[in-house]
């Protein structure tokens, strides 16, 4: 049930949680001030404010843990994507500086980037799984790098290990990204948050059995806060699920730095020279 709610589109996600807690707020109001239940509910009068405070402290701690897990996953996802893009760019730079033929590496990098951005990103958004095209492209890239070797006496032979290490860093960053894209929500934590939010509404109702208007005001404030905070955290649960997701731009930009085989490597524009200071007379 929790996973089904987290996988809903944002409007339906908000509507579902607002409907549930709006319905419980209306039911509690009817229970407290309805003709049939009013006399019975007044027998519970006398609850102290510490009841609400204790429940809300536990709720705040738990929602903090859930939010921390969600936002930590986002930070790790952004770091993995940035690392993957940076490793691809550095692999191209090292290949260019190694003195080896670079057409094969350039071609494989471009194929891998295209597979990741066009196939794997939609696959992660749909069901959190990898794309076979990206796995095959990465395997071909690593094989190409591993097959390129200098003569042991060549001064540039030191690049051989660096190139392979950088290709393996791409693989490691992709693995970290795929782990974070897997649909594995903390269902037990979310269920605890839902239950404690309901307990918070019940405690508000217990504290405001005397007058309807304070009851409505307190319940509206609490319910609105619960709905908004749980919706915002739930919308960020999957770092690669739309509409709020980690972009593939750091990997896509690699295509601007890695030209197609046979084309020259784009050069960085020269830095503007500092203007000469005024000469003394």
Image: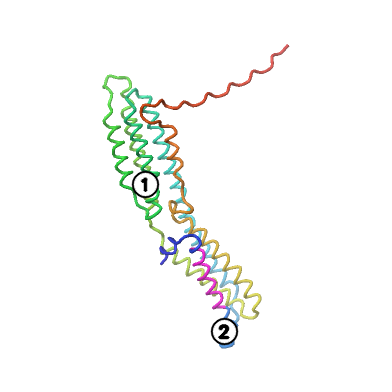
Q: Which residue lies at the image location 49% right of the left edge and 26% below the top edge?
A: 268
Whole-percent x, y for residue 83 in the image: 42, 40
Given residues 241 and 119, the one toward you in this image is 119
Given residues 62 and 122, the one toward you in this image is 122
For label 2, the residue is 41
> Is residue 140 left or right of 226 when viewed as pictured?
left
CA gap, disc 1 to disc 2? 59 Å
- Tell which residue pokes out farthest to the right in this image: 281
Q: How crowded is mark 2: few (under 14 residues within 10 Å), some or many (20 or more)?
A: some
| Above-or-below relation of 226 to 175 | below
- For mark 1, give the secondary structure: helix
User: Is residue 19 highlighted in magenta?
Assistant: yes
Which numbered marker is on residue 119? 1
| Above-or-below relation of 277 to 147 | above
> Is residue 251 left or right of 24 when viewed as pictured?
left
The answer to which of marks 1 and 2 sits earlier in the sequence is: 2
Identify the image quadrant of residue 206.
bottom right
Identify the image quadrant of residue 163.
top left
- The colour scheme used here is rainbow
Do residues under tags 1 and 2 come within 8 Å of each other at their CB atoms?
Answer: no
Which numbered marker is on residue 96? none
* Of the two numbered discs 1 and 2 in the rendering, the one whose residue sits closer to the viewer: 1
| Above-or-below relation of 281 to 42 | above
Chain part drawn in magenta: 13-28
Quadrant in the picture for the N terminus = bottom left
Whole-percent x, y for residue 152 in the image: 26, 22
Whole-percent x, y for residue 89 in the image: 41, 33
- For mark 2, give the secondary structure: helix
């Amino acid at each position: 049930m929790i996973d089904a709610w987290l996988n809903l589109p944002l409007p339906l996600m908000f509507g579902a949680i607002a409907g549930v807690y709006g319905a419980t707020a209306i039911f509690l109001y009817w229970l407290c001030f309805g003709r049939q239940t009013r006399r019975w509910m007044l027998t519970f009068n006398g609850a102290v404010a510490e009841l609400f405070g204790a429940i809300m402290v536990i709720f705040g701690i738990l929602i903090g843990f859930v939010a921390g897990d969600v936002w930590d996953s986002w930070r790790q996802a952004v770091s993995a994507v940035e690392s993957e893009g940076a490793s691809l760019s550095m692999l191209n730079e090292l290949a260019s500086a190694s003195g080896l033929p670079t057409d094969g590496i350039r071609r494989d990098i471009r194929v891998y980037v295209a597979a990741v951005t066009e196939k794997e990103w939609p696959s992660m958004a749909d069901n959190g799984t990898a794309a076979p095209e990206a796995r095959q492209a990465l395997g071909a890239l690593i094989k190409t790098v591993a097959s390129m070797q200098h003569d042991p006496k060549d001064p540039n032979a030191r690049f051989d290990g660096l190139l392979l290490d950088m290709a393996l860093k791409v693989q490691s960053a992709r693995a970290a990204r795929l782990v974070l894209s897997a649909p594995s929500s903390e269902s037990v934590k979310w269920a605890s948050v839902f239950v404690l939010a309901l307990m918070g509404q019940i405690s508000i109702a217990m504290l405001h059995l005397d007058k309807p208007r304070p009851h409505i005001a307190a319940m509206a404030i609490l319910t609105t806060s619960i709905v908004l905070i749980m919706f915002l955290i739930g919308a960020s649960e999957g770092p690669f699920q739309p509409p709020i997701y980690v972009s593939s731009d750091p990997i896509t930009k690699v295509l601007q730095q890695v030209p197609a085989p046979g084309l020259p490597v784009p050069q960085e524009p020269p830095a503007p020279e500092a203007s000469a200071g005024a000469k003394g007379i």
